[in-house]
Amino acid sequence: MNLYMVYRVDRDDGQAAQIRAATRPAHRAYMDQFAGRVRLGGPLLDGDGQGCGGLMLIEGESEAAVRELVRNDPFELAGLSSRIEIRPFRWQTGRPADLPPL
């Protein structure tokens, strides 16, 4: 398994908070299926402490597999993000002991 960073930025048309609130339960239920593969995750916050995107580290067979996982997330099916970046990630600082050595 490889590790991928998923960086999501919310749409900026004033609809993001409503979409997030409406789809959060479905998002959480969906992501629970991948609890063993999501190594880190949570919202990005704006200056007022409100969600404005998200960051996750996900283990996957390939970038394409992680893209498919993200594409089927209820947040994305509802159109929450304006931008999504998925990049291979090498965890160095504070590396969990269960990851293979570098």
Image: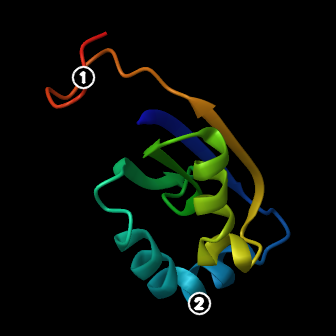
Quadrant for the C terminus in the image: top left
- In depth, the one of 37 and 85 nearer the eye is 37
> Position of 81 compared to 63: left or right?
right
Residue for badge 2: 22
For the point 37% across and 72% down, the residue is 33
Q: x, y (%) of residue 66? A: 58, 50
> Position of 18 compared to 83: left or right?
left
Using the rendered view, name the quadrant where residue 21 is placed. bottom right
Residue for badge 1: 95
Disc 1 residue type (three-letter): Arg
Q: Residue furthest right?
A: 13
Using the rendered view, name the quadrant where residue 77 is placed. bottom right
Find the distance from the CA under tag 2 to the CA under tag 1: 35 Å
- In depth, the one of 3 and 57 nearer the eye is 3
- In depth, the one of 102 and 45 nearer the eye is 102
- In depth, the one of 33 and 83 nearer the eye is 33
For the point 46% across and 77% down, the residue is 30
Q: Residue furthest bottom?
A: 22
Disc 2 residue type (three-letter): Ala
Q: x, y (%) of residue 100? A: 25, 21
Nearest to the eye among marks 2 and 1: give it: 1
Would you call the spot at circle 2 few (<14 residues within 10 Å), some (14-19), or many (20 or more)?
some
For the point 23% across and 21% down, the residue is 94
Of pointers 2 and 1, the one earlier in the residue sequence: 2
In the structure shown, which secondary structural element does the residue marked by tag 1 occupy?
loop
Q: x, y (%) of residue 65? A: 60, 51
Label placed on residue 40: none
> Position of 11 compared to 2: left or right?
right
Asked if marks 2 and 1 touch (Cβ < 8 Å), the reply is no
